Image (cartoon, helix red, strand yellow):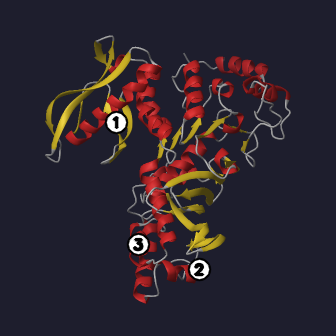
Amino acid sequence: MNITNVRIHKITLCDFKNVEFGSIDFACSKKDEYPGVDIMGLYGQNGSGKTALIDALDILKTILSGRSLSDDCVNYIAIGKELAHLVYVFEVKSQREKFKVEYSFDLAKEKADSESNIENADSAVKFRAVIRNEVLSMSGVVAGHKFKMQPLINTSSQDSPFLPNTKFNELIGGDKELRNKMMVSKQLAKERSQSFIFFKDTLLAIKSNCKVSEYIFVINALVQYGNFYLYVVDTKSTGLINLNAALPFFFRFDNEKSLSTGSIAIKLEGSSIVPTQVCNIIQKAISNMNTVLEQLVPGLNVGLENIGFALLPDKSEGCTVELVSIRNGNTLPLRYESEGIKKIISILQLLIAMYNNEGMTVAIDELDSGIFEYLLGELLKVISESGKGQLVFTSHNLRPLETIDKKFIFFTTANPKNRYVQLENVQTNHNMRYFYYRDIVLGGQKEELYDLTNNYEIALSFKKAGEFDAF
């Protein structure tokens, strides 16, 4: 079971940001196999829950990677609620095995200790987010027997590291001293705002003691997925580009000998100092990326100029570098290119990797930001027709509604108790862009897709506000 693919089938959010309840079944969940791309484009008015989905994927990556939740996560719990509940359903498969896996947890609010650096300007009491009541369930063939969905690890017990006891014995063993150590690890994971299931001590204990290869396979597959195959690009990246401060360069360079993956912010104003090894990886990734870039923007290549040797703060060797654009043999600093071109360069290596690898999931908030709508539509059309991986994106530009299959498109609603829907009664000969506009104005769906505004009231509010103009 050396070749692993993980694909998200479903995400459910409860009391998460402005989503009281929202559930999305990805297109790949409706078929037995997925030898092709799976796209999930999310559309809707401002403040209706699009970014909530991207944030939920970012939390998932954080958890599976064994990292601590950021301070901001406490603000993801809906106002007036003590916790949010998140559920993720996956298919995990290798060349010979296939499992359905469900992972759920509560994102809870807890008072921070006095030594915490967490800031909460709205209250004298400081809070942090913790992960509670984790449940990892799976179904499939285990040790030659087919099992329906059942809990593998349930951390809700206060008296045991996790339940059921039969699964604890299969995963960890019956050693009482080890059980006590696991209780300590459970408390430590909570104090660090980390997942106990994917805490390093838990993973090590399972790896050392579990004799059921299928359990080890599924858990390792999720860990690898979070670390190397799930990528989330939020609007903070776009903000750096808009300010012309830095270009967040996301790279995943895979060859037969090694896998290089990560992201680095490279200054747009002036030069940056990066480790020599990272410099070499980025140069290889850029060389690979230019093959596609010159087709998207004819005549354009990007380069990483190595200006010279430098020492990093830890005294290791580094390079002084600057990003440049190359057009018809002419070189100039990349900062003079448009925001759209810089956005494409920032994410293109991830899109290439997702296009060629069915185990890759790339989630991008506001994919359309700065990108010409015709190019956006054609780019997504190519990916939807020939890609292999999984792409999740939010957008305000409606051009993709005309170029990709309706099964890949979801919409937010004005109902926080049912945030995510797909349009009903869309025929193959319908232009989904105009169909969506029509349903916003005339209705026709079970849920309202837009909380309608009144032009006269908007005009009146502008006039009233002008009466108090202090300038």
Q: Position of residue 7 (x, y in %)?
A: 56, 51
C-alpha span from label 1 to label 2: 45 Å
Give the residue pinned by disc 1.
Answer: 265
Give the residue pinned by disc 3.
Answer: 207
Assess whether mark 2 and mark 1 are in contact (beta carbons under 8 angstroms).
no
Q: Residue at x 47, y 60 (%)?
A: 221
Which element type, helix, strand or loop, lies under badge 3?
helix
Assess whether mark 3 and mark 2 are in contact (beta carbons under 8 angstroms).
no
In this picture, residue 195 sits left or right of residue 445:
left
Res. 79 visible in picture: no
Which element type, helix, strand or loop, lies under badge 2?
loop
Give the residue pinned by disc 2.
Answer: 164
Task: Pick whichever, 48 or 260, lies toward us.
Answer: 260
Q: Residue at x 28, y 32 (%)?
A: 283
In this picture, residue 196 sits left or right of residue 76:
left
In this picture, residue 54 sits left or right of residue 428:
left
Q: Amino acid at mark 2?
A: Pro
Quadrant of image for the C terminus = top right
- Snapshot quadrant of residue 422: top right
Mark 2 or 3: in front is 3
Q: Residue at x 35, y 20 (%)?
A: 301
